[in-house]
Amino acid sequence: MDQILEKWDEILMTVKTEHDISDIAFNTFLRPLEFYGVTGNTAYILVPSEQLGLSYISKKYYLPLKVAITEITGTEYEIKFILPEQAKSIASSPNKQKKPFYSEAASKSNLNSNYTFDTFVVGSNNRFAHSASLAVAESPGEAYNPLYIYGGPGLGKTHLMHSIGHFILERNPDAKIICVTSEEFTNEVIESIRSGNAAAMNKFREKYRTIDVLMIDDVQFIIGKESTQEEFFHTFNALHSAGKQIILTSDKPPKEMETLEERIRSRFEWGLMADIGTPDYETRMAILRKKIEADEMNLSDEILNYIATNIKSNIRELEGALNKLLAYSNLEKTDITMEIAQKELQNIITPDKPKEITPQLIIEVVSEHFQISLDQMISKNRSKDIARPRQIAMYLCKNMTDTPLDSIGALLGGRDHSTIIHGVQKISDEYESDETTRSLIDTIKKKINPN
Ligand SMILES: Nc1ncnc2c1ncn2[C@@H]1O[C@H](COP(=O)(O)OP(=O)(O)OP(=O)(O)O)[C@@H](O)[C@H]1O
């Protein structure tokens, strides 16, 4: 069963390719189908609404899906299409996990599958940014170019930007979208320059100048990097003059980026700037409700109210509180009462008590910031993409907590004392000498401790 679930996207794409199904037919009939579960050797496929045409789908896609499932999983299943009402009566081991459709194009573009317009709650704090994002998604390159979304940490800038990407790819799966953090962009510029050959630079330029949509997250980090700013400037011009869409996010408006080159600042301001503020109570409650629904979690309104009243300025923290309760409920196999919620969340939300900053919290925030898993953080993998976040975690654990170096090493995959000293020293030197690193570290610190 897991195999079908895991490979569901691949199964759908295989049917599309092998039967030469048009994008419109694919998006209309195949994409909405969900793998529901397996009973015996029957695989149930959920047709989410009768209007979609159950009998048409059964006739047309029964055999292609059966063949693709057999080919891809190596097991032959009987296939049954069911409607949601029928699904309820299938008792045995239905698959409760709904996995969102995640196209190959979205994954290649580096888009987070959870960040879509469907999962985004619109409130007074983000209404304008949301409308602007929808307008850009509907007419990329035409509505507002660039779209510059700014606001404090954890307020949904990245979520909105990725939503635009998914929306564009849904309509046009061939659209070429690149979504990077400005750190990744900077690293690529540095790598191309360091390699010293023209071919590497040309490859970089070819990659960034032949796309339809460029998304750069946390663009404030290009401040102070001369060659990155230079490359960004030319990339921006090439894409903009070709009518290609550029979307940027930042923690501040361009006018507050004091040391940014003027020619770049003015370009940031060419299109539309949309800020996201802190959510009001209703929006916080709506976000909490949406998340518990998605996680199929049971929490009383009293508990939701307790969280929404106490966590006000960062949606990532709202989610963190829910995740903590979810983990507790799963581990202890118990329902969450108000008493448990207050006890479990006391570090996060007791207003007069400073938040406890632990190495575990730091490691979690760093891995989330760099979009790498906790397993990668503690692994033996020494590639730059993993080793640098790990060293940043070492540095922050050393500077923000009193944890001994040996314990930091133990938490980061059993690394020894000297490895930790080396990591801390390296980031410390960079913090002193390099403005981008300083700004990066300060941003992560703010995520760890917004106060
Ligand atoms: N309006 C919203 N509806 C639903 N979820 C939201 C909303 N705003 C933010 N979130 C969730 O909060 C978390 C943080 O959002 P996101 O990463 O987009 O913030 P950000 O503004 O880019 O933060 P940072 O600047 O710290 O990177 C994500 O999990 C996101 O899905």
Image: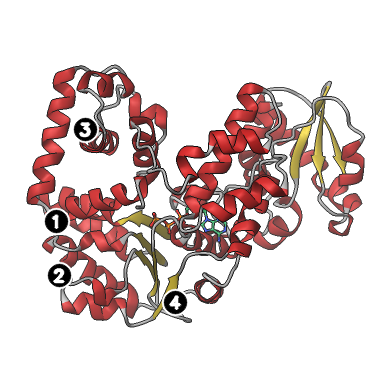
Q: Is ligand 1 within 8 Å of the beta carbon of the residue shown at mark 4? A: no
Q: Which mark is residue 141?
A: 4
Residue 214 on image: x %, y %: 38, 64
Residue mark closest to the camera, 4 vs 2: 2
Mark 4: give few (<14), some (14-19) or many (20+) Cα within 10 Å: many
Residue at image location 87% in from the left, 59% down from the top? 51
Disc with the residue nearer the chain's start (3 vs 4):
4
Disc with the residue nearer the chain's start (4 vs 1):
4
The CA span between labels 1 and 3 is 20 Å
Mark 1: give few (<14), some (14-19) or many (20+) Cα within 10 Å: some
| Residue type (three-letter) at the residue carrying disc 2 | Thr
Residue 48 on image: x %, y %: 81, 50
Q: Is ligand 1 within 8 Å of the beta carbon of the residue shown at mark 1? A: no
Q: Is residue 195 visible to the viewer in this orientation of the structure?
A: no
Nearest to the observer: residue 405 or residue 19? 405
| Residue type (three-letter) at the residue carrying disc 3 | Lys
Give the residue pinned by disc 3.
398
Q: Which mark is residue 259?
A: 2
Farthest residue, direction front:
352
The CA span between labels 2 and 3 is 29 Å
Label 2 SS: loop
The CA span between labels 4 and 2 is 28 Å
Residue at image location 22% in from the left, 70% down from the top? 257
Give the residue pinned by disc 1.
435
Task: Determine contact: label 4, label 2, CB under 8 Å.
Answer: no
Task: Determine contact: label 2, label 1, CB under 8 Å.
Answer: yes
